[in-house]
Image: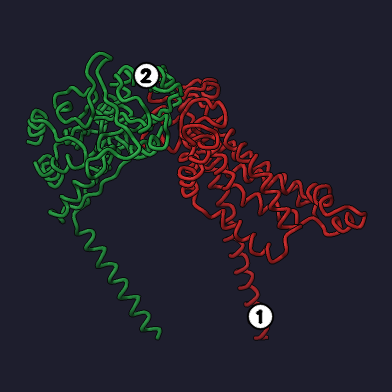
Chain colours: A red, B green
Amino acid sequence: MVKKMITTRRTSFIRFKESAIRAFFFTNGILAVFILLGIFLFLLYTAFPAFREIDIKEFFTSKNWDPTSPVKEEYGILSMIVSTFLVTLGALAIAVPIGIGVASYLSDVAHWKVREIVKPIVEILAGIPSVVIGFLGIVLFGPAIAKITGQSHGLNAINGSILLAVMALPTIISISEDSLNAVPRAYKEASLALGASRWQTLIRVKIPAALSGIIAAVMLGMGRAIGETMTVLMATGNAPAFPRGFLSSIRTMTATIAIELGEVPYYTTHYYALFAIGLVLFIITFFVNLISDIVLHKFQEREL
Amino acid sequence: MNSRKLLLVGFLCLGLIASAGTVSAQRKMMQIKGSDTLVNLVQILAEVYMAKNPRNPIAVLGGGSGTGIAALINGTCDIANHSRPIKDKELQMAKDNGVTPHTFVIAVDGLSVIVNQNNPVSRLSIDQIGAMFRGEIKTWKEVGGPDKSISLYGRQSNSGTYGFFQEYVLGNQNYSADMKQMNGNAQIVEGVTADKLGVGYVGVGYVVDAQGNVKKGIKILKVSKDTDSAAYSPLDKAAIDSGDYPIARGLLQSTAGGPKGAVLDFITFELSPEGQKIVEEEGFFPIGAGQMVENTKKLK
């Protein structure tokens, strides 16, 4: 009788503990959602007043950004949107082939000992502070680019692209390799049994089977590149002109916010306009991440 | 064992409380903020001052003239460094916040236009420099150099040097959108050193090294008022004093209301012969007699 009472007491305590723990983790999970929502609403609230004085069409279609001009204050972000995408696409053009190549090597070619050494090193690469990479851009890549291209200086879009490629590589390699490893062993064995070479198996069977994971990896790498600030701020020259190619100095959306937010008098059109740029950037990265998430989920479902 | 640990924790807590007590008992640290052109100079002035007056600690920050003036208006600094006059718009904002800026000239700067040492051009007129930075003159050939495009280095828009140059050299016109906007004077010097087609503008304190020699890799252009008149170097003290060098400017400090206490003491030190000697050692120029009279009036 007494023994029974103790056990019921104990089970009810365990139940209480269970539900308390569950509530704790639920709060943590939901907190992330509220933070995201809060940031979005704050951006919306602070960006909105900008359009009392700026024509929204001009904001997106004008190439001129000069909010402190003594002649006429201009708030056009087209040049920086194009600059941001130019640097990002350049970075992807470099990082995607290398990233997939390294991932394929690690998953299919490399000896397991090599993989155990190389993969952690690749992941450490993700931990290098962006300001250090930007510094390399100024002292190492910049002068090299200037020499190779015959320009007088190397503070341009291609410099930013190379640095962002370095920063996006760990993400792309790591997730691509995981998705290549997740391809069922039977696919590879069947392909080899049918007489396909290892190269053919990799290109025609494994990479297509892991494609959605690889695409998600690329999109995540892209999200990282679009939002990166310090590296591009240091290496791309920050000339607000509309880019004429990879060899021109450019200024991205993130760099503009970073340079100007420190000085701007609060609650002025210029201040609100910087938040409007932030909102545009937020929406772009949100969709890039959303797409990569959808693709990744599709891939995981098919695996099940 | 446990009680001993507890004792240790207790002592640590006591120590923390004690140290917190001494910190709060100390005087508030004087905050100086603003112009990147002035930051090194004021830092050294503050170090020398603090060596003599350890009871008045000073923190000097850069960030640009606009940042310093904004901080003064918002009440987050005691002294704002700025290399351009306070704008009417900023004065209005200060008034709205109940702040009356008192401005002092603490040094004189010959704003220097620099090119790579291999550039054959050695003198330019204000009009030519203005046209280059407005983007109207695009190649060095138009000013007597090689037939190559000009690579412009300037400052970001919160810089007082950016504002001063825009007003006095560009004639209040827009900068070329192709100008690379660098985050500080030192970055412009670095950029022009590496770029054989580069041209940039920096405070004179940034073009000479500690021994007073022109830094390696750059050339300081002589500047003339117009194409026919004589051109002067910003290192020429006589030309700065006489006003013959066309883009000399006062480097300024502002306080909210008249300076008091430690702030007054520090500004007095900056204006003293000893302070002005440091100004000269740092590559800038001491202020003239007229400016000194103006300053003394404001200090009283």
The subunit letter for the residue under badge 1 reads A
**Front in this rendered view, residue B132 or B35:** B132
Where, quadrant-wise, is the N terminus of chain B in this rendering? Answer: bottom left
With respect to residue A291, does A83 lie above or below? above
- Quick check: can you spot residue B14? yes
Q: Is residue B216 left or right of residue A261?
A: left
With respect to residue B135, does B293 lie above or below? below
Q: Is residue A288 left or right of residue B56?
A: right
**Front in this rendered view, residue B212 or B147:** B147
Q: Amino acid at mark 1?
A: Thr
Quick check: marks 1 and 2 in contact, CB under 8 Å?
A: no
- Disc 1, SS: helix
Instruction: Indicate the position of residue B260 as horizontal and vertical percent values.
Output: 12, 42
Q: Nearer the viewer, mark 1 or mark 2?
A: 2
Q: Residue at x 23, y 63 (%)?
A: B21
- Disc 2, SS: helix
The residue sitting at the top extreme is: B228
Q: Residue at x 36, y 79 (%)?
A: B6
- Mark 2 Cα shell of 10 Å, populated few (<14), some (14-19), many (≥20): some
The subunit letter for the residue under badge 2 reads B
Q: How far apart, in angstroms, are the residues tagged by discs 1 and 2?
A: 96 Å
Which quadrant of the structure image shows residue A19?
Answer: bottom right
Which quadrant of the structure image shows residue B230?
Answer: top left
- Residue matched to label 1: A7
- Residue matched to label 2: B143
Same-chain status of marks 1 and 2: no
Instruction: Indicate the position of residue B211 as horizontal and vertical percent values.
Output: 22, 44
**Front in this rendered view, residue B18 or B104:** B104
Q: Residue at x 64, y 63 (%)?
A: A117
Instruction: Indicate the position of residue B62 as horizontal and vertical percent values.
Output: 30, 42
Where, quadrant-wise, is the C terminus of chain B in this rendering? Answer: top left
Q: Is residue B105 left or right of residue A59?
A: left
